[in-house]
Every structure is written in C-alpha cells, then in structure tokens.
Image (cartoon, rainbow, N blue to C red):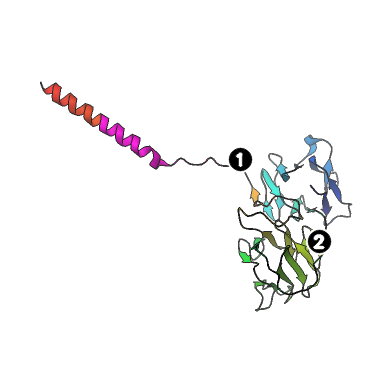
C-alpha cells in the first residue's frame, strides 16, 4: 500500500503520515484534532491495513463527519475523503496521480469506465466514460454543474487505453484527485475526483471486471458511510425449496387421518 497522509485543510499543521496500524485521533487543549498516543483519549481511530482505511468512532461521540455525512460508528475511507472533527477538516491524501498523456486521437478501450457521483449535485448519478465528457456550467456540458461560481468549462474527461484522462478546461483552481490538487492527470478505477471542493465523483469499472489499475491503492468497493458493522448480511433461504417437503408431510397427514377415520368407525 502506498504512503498515506492526513492534511489539515484549515490549520497551519504539517501533514501526518499514516503507516499501517492503528492511529488514534483526539482533540488537544486548543480544540484542534491531532493524533494521540493513548486510545483512551481518542474520539476516533484510523485503522490502516492492506484492505484500506477504516474510521471507527468512539461510542457516544457526535459531530464527526466524512464528506459532510455524519458517522456514528464506522466508515470505510478512500483517499481524497474529507474528515470533519470538532470544526477541523482533515483530508486523506495518497500519492500524486500520474500526469496526463499527450493529446492524441480517440483511444480504444474496453474498460467501459463510469463516473459516479458520491457528493454534490450529481450524487448517485453515473456517467459513462466511453466517450469524452465535458464538466462545467455551460449548457453543452455532459456533467453540468449549474452554479454561478462554477466555470463554464471546468474540465474534460477522455477515455484512454490506460484509464481516463482528466484535462483542465479553464477552471480557476483545477481539481482534486485523491486529495491532491491537479490540472491534468491520468485516472484509474478507484480514484476520487472533486470539482470545486464539493462535487465528488469516483471512477468505477463494471462489477466483476478487473480494473486497469488503481493509483489510489484503495478498494474499489462503495465507500459510503457505514453506521453498523461491516459484516455482510446472510443470504436468505429460498422458501420454494421447502415446498416438496411440505406437500409430502401434508399427504402423509391426510393418509393417517383417513386410516384413523376408516378403522375408527369400525
């Protein structure tokens, strides 16, 4: 797994390195969120392993959010997620994404990647990336973000044999890819891209199809906030499988009742 960092977005604090293991997150005397040594002092903890990063919130703690959504017990994180603790915003960062390749003609790709909204105006929507998609406020944009402060043409997403190419189209501050500010970059399944700090999207590959890479180093599973445990629900049994046994039992009971009435009448 690549090196991960926590960045303080609104505090003059150096980035905090997150090595594999458990990292306790607490509040210091000034009210800032910091990493603490003792778990008893923690309001939450970050568990980093080969599966990814898990945020566990201490029982009774309120006011902790991931990408603006409250977390009560547990959440699976991906690089680029914003964590809010006691008014302090922390960004989970990975390595800088690969640079965008030179502009060329349409690239043949079989990945059939999609851009899925996980925050902002297009939350829950999916846009196919089988062709070039424009992002912006203009009416001709494929991913339209109709807000006054948003650029008419913010960026363009182009299909590529190695993933998806993000090219800036005239935005003021560029975009965030896995928490890192970029203008142009090569994206892979699992990468999170944020436009204007609040419109969040993730690059996804079809279910059951291997991705073409994952520069984020994180799982490709849905990382929506989890309020319960991560244990998968047990599959329900098919009630139709029990029907033959029920019919056989009913026939046996009917036969026994008939014999009882027949011999009992004598």
In the displayed structure image, the side of residue 88 where residue 259 appears, left or right? left
- Which is more foreground, mark 2 or mark 1? 2
What separation in Å lies between label 2 and label 1 (alpha carbons)?
Answer: 35 Å
Which residue extends farthest front? 108
Which residue is at a point 80% across and 37% down the rendered structure image? 41
Res 126 → quadrant: bottom right
- Tell me the SS state at disc 1: loop
Res 157 → quadrant: bottom right
User: Does the magenta-highlighted stretch encompass residue 230?
Assistant: yes
| Residue 216 x %, y % | 76, 54
The residue closer to the viewer here, 173 or 183, is 183
Disc 2 marks which residue?
98
User: Does the magenta-highlighted stretch encompass residue 80?
Assistant: no
Label whose residue precedes the other's in the sequence (2 or 1): 2
- Tell me the SS state at disc 2: loop
The residue closer to the viewer here, 253 or 228, is 253
Region in magenta: 228-252
Disc 1 marks which residue?
231
Q: Is residue 152 above or below residue 187?
A: below
| Residue 251 x %, y % | 26, 33
The residue closer to the viewer here, 255 or 82, is 255
| Residue 123 x %, y % | 63, 62
Crowd class of label 2 (few under 14; some 14 to 19; many from 20; radius 10 Å): few
Which residue is at a point 73% across and 52% down the rendered structure image? 78
């Amino acid at each position: 797994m690549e090196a991960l960092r926590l960045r303080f977005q609104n505090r003059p604090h150096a980035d905090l390195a997150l090595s594999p293991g458990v990292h306790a997150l607490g509040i210091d005397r000034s009210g800032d969120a910091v990493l603490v040594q003792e778990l008893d002092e923690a309001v939450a903890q970050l568990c980093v392993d080969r599966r990814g990063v898990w945020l566990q919130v201490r029982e009774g703690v309120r006011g902790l959010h991931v990408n603006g959504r409250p977390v009560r017990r547990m959440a699976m994180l991906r690089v680029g997620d914003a964590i809010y603790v006691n008014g302090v915003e922390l960004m989970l960062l990975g390595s800088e994404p690969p640079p965008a390749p030179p502009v060329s003609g349409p690239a043949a790709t079989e990945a059939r990647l999609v851009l899925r909204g996980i925050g902002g105006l297009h939350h829950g929507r999916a846009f196919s990336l089988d062709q070039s998609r424009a992002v912006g406020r203009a009416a001709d944009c494929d991913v339209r973000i109709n807000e006054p402060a948003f650029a008419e043409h913010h960026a363009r997403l182009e299909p590529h044999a190695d993933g998806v190419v993000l090219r800036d189209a005239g935005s003021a501050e560029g975009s965030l890819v896995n928490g890192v500010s970029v203008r142009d970059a090569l994206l892979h399944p699992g990468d999170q891209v944020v436009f204007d700090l609040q419109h969040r999207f993730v690059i996804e590959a079809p279910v059951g199809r291997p991705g073409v890479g994952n520069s984020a180093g994180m799982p490709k599973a849905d990382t929506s906030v989890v309020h319960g445990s991560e244990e998968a629900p047990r599959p329900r049994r098919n009630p139709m499988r029990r029907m033959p046994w029920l019919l056989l039992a009913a026939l046996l009971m009917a036969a026994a009742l008939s014999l009882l009435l027949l011999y009992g009448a004598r």
